[in-house]
Amino acid sequence: MTSRSQVFFLGCIAGLTIPAGALAQGAPAAAPVDNGAAPTIAFDTVDFIKLKPGQNLGEVLGIAVNSKGDVVILNHPGSATTGPLYGNATTEVLQFDKNGKFVREIGHGVYALGYSHSVRFDRHDNLWVVDKGTDSVIEFDPSGKVLLNLGRRPEGYDSGHEEHLKQAQAVPVDGWFRSPTDVAWDQDDNIFVSDGYVNSRVAKLNKDGDWIKSWGKYGKGGPNADENPYNIDNPHNMQTDRQGNVYVADRGNRRIHVYDRDGNFIRFMFLNAPYDKSRHPVLGNAPSNPDAMPDQTAPWALCISPTTPQYLFVVDAEPGRLYKMTLDGKILGMLGQSGHRMGQFNWPHALACPGENTVFVADMNNWRVQKITLHPERLAR
């Protein structure tokens, strides 16, 4: 499709800052940062992937960009394979060049690829795939060879590895994952895994894959700074900054947790920008009681730019906005809304941000990748 400029209304995000250990010491919670009305960011968007005539993508769950500008996506084509995983075993890891032209498929036939959830490049341009369906995290070198496999794919009933439990019933086991969702690293190449739809925790391993520790458990939390910073309800996405701080998108609790690399809690951030709660969502019906809906929306995906300074990009599913923030929670601007047209998102599931004004969006349920170019010089209230 041709590029079309889109401009949308913006609101604000409030961030909460708490010194590490403040909650344990009984210190009063910090007040939310008042960001006021955030500015509008103008942007252009283009359908990035160039497909052959008759070719289509399926659900695009993950996206990553390496140092050369090559783009890798997780494509779920639906009919590629069959198997006992939820929604069948279906994952293609596809690489495209910086212009969106197909280069190759990576990992075809790899045992741990079943229903993959996230894909990331580390600072060495090694590619990591987090597979929700097989409870595995796989590292590939730039040639496509498997370097490391973390976790283990469940076998049949006689394997001794029980079926996935509900979050409240799960008893996490060191070294094992249950429906992991994302991966990140600190400056020493320690590995962090958000684990996940079932275990509701963050795992830390060293660069060789040896287990170090984990933190977090399933539980509910609210929009206040003193409400259970280690309660997590689906750590759906995760990133680290240059200091090794870990940012976790707690989708079920509608908040972002920030920890240091040892698991000490630092602060929450909330996506509580004003929006029209009565608007029709991209899926389902308009809410029957809009006033009862929470002010904060659920973070689905995160990306921290490699720039100086670094920026945090966040996207929610409803009302479907992409936020640009500072790492301390200040909102710099936002754009977009849920929908089917270009410049709109339908369950945006992953972000890649190679620059401070370039963001790739895995527009999952619209079966496409959008390349967003922000134009902050056109900021307007």
Image (spheres, rainbow, N blue to C red):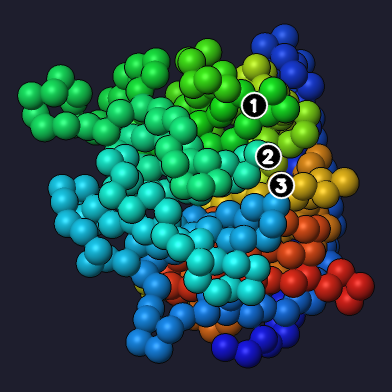
**Residues marked 1 and 3 touching at CB (< 8 Å):** no
* Pick the front one: 211 or 264: 211
Q: Secondary structure at mark 1?
A: loop
Residue placed most toward the observer, 29 or 42: 42
Residue 200 at x, y percent in the picture: 43, 30
Q: Earlier in the sequence, mark 3 or mark 2?
A: 2
Q: Is residue 333 left or right of residue 90?
A: right
The residue mark sitting in front, 1 or 3, is 1
Q: Residues at badges 2 and 1 in contact (C-beta under 8 Å)? A: yes
Pointer 2: what residue? 123
- Residue located 21% across and 59% down the image: 81
Residue 99 x, y percent position in the rendering: 64, 74
Residue 273: where, in percent of width, then height? 70, 58
Q: Is residue 17 above or below residue 88?
A: above
Does label 2 or label 1 sit earlier along the sequence?
A: 2
Amino acid type of the residue tagged 2 in the rendering: Arg
Q: Quadrant of the N terminus?
A: bottom right
237 lies above or below 87? above
**In the image, 179: left or right of 252?**
left
Determine which of the numbered discs, if any, sits on residue 173 in the image. none
Q: Amino acid at mark 1?
A: Asp
Q: Which mark is residue 304?
A: 3
Residue at 57% from the left image edge and 79% from the top image edge: 47
**Are the residues tagged 3 and 2 within 8 Å (C-beta)?**
no
C-alpha gap between disc 1 and disc 3: 16 Å
Above or below residue 97? Residue 302 is: above
